[in-house]
Image: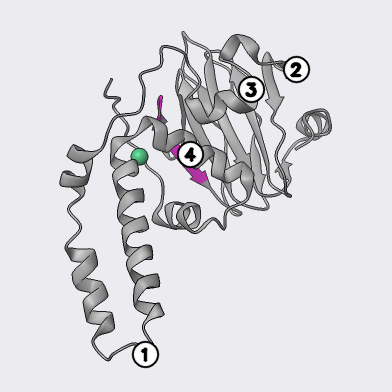
């Protein structure tokens, strides 16, 4: 199934994923997006190819003067369309959760242990190593997520439904990156529950008193 994905992974996230330097929480969001998105999967293979070639070059005693030029030729030579065509599609799944996520949840959406956090919103915090946390969020259609800003990066992948905020509309497969100075109020599109996977680098700061209480309950 080809999804209409409008918002993709930033290069920095893909590079970090290939290099294995991302916290597990962000790795999971990247892996989940890649399993849904042909384009980012092809870009990931391109980064892998360049990374491997650079390592091969580094093995040679000295980098020659034109090694940089050679690297650029290598990058230019990567044909994303061809890589996409050669790519074996991942096994088709009929559920909502992509394969990388299912192993964390122990199944599809019906295996998730949701905890209500107020305003009709539910969440399930997933077990990961490191400071960054990752959670599944279920926001009823038409409901607003409390105004919050970040003291670190947040990466959100939509799995079902859609939400909108100042940055645009995010539907299934779309990724939104938000960093420190962004205060945003995502609103779930009316009609369907919005199911998201969100990785957060550091605690969120909610703006009002009530959301601060919610923050305590939500452990974010
Ligand atoms: Zn993508």
- Which residue reaches farthest front? 60
Q: Which mark is residue 115?
A: 2
The residue carrying mark 3 is 105
Q: Nearer the viewer, residue 161 or 72?
A: 72
Residue 69 horizontal/vertical position (percent):
22, 80
Q: Residue at x 62, y 24 (%)?
A: 137
| 2 vs 1, front mark | 1
| 2 vs 4, front mark | 4
Q: Which mark is residue 62?
A: 1
The residue stretch that appears in magenta: 170-177
Alpha-carbon distance for marks 3 and 4? 15 Å
Q: Is residue 197 above or below residue 177?
A: above
Report the image quarter containing ligand 1.
Answer: top left
| 2 vs 3, front mark | 3
Residue 214 horizontal/vertical position (percent):
79, 28
Rendered-image quadrant of the N terminus: top left
Q: Nearer the viewer, residue 49 or 30?
A: 49
The numbered mark, 2 or 4, whose residue comes first in the sequence reads 4
The numbered mark, 4 or 1, whose residue comes first in the sequence reads 4
The numbered mark, 2 or 1, whose residue comes first in the sequence reads 1
* 211 relative to 106 in the view: left or right: right
Asked if the residue at label 1 sits under 8 Å from ligand 1, the reply is no
């Amino acid at each position: 199934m080809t999804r209409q994905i409008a918002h993709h992974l930033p290069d920095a996230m893909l590079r970090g994923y290939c290099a294995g330097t991302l916290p597990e929480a962000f790795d999971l969001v990247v892996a989940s997006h890649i399993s849904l998105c042909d384009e980012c999967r092809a870009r990931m293979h391109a980064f892998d190819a360049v990374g491997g070639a650079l390592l091969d070059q580094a093995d040679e005693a000295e980098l020659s003067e034109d090694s940089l030029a050679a690297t650029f030729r290598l990058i230019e030579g990567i044909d994303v369309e061809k890589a996409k065509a050669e790519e074996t599609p991942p096994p088709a799944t009929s559920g909502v959760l992509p394969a990388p996520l299912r192993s964390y949840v122990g199944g599809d959406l019906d295996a998730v242990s949701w905890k209500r956090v107020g305003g009709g919103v539910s969440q399930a915090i997933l077990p990961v190593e490191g400071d960054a946390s990752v959670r599944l969020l279920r926001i009823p259609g038409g409901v607003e997520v409390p105004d919050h800003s970040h003291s670190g990066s947040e990466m959100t992948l939509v799995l079902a439904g859609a939400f909108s905020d100042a940055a645009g509309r995010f539907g299934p497969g779309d990724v939104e990156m938000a960093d420190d100075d962004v205060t945003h109020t995502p609103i779930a599109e009316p009609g369907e529950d919005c199911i998201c996977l969100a990785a957060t680098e550091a605690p969120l700061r909610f703006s009002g008193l009530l959301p601060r209480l919610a923050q305590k309950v939500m452990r974010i």
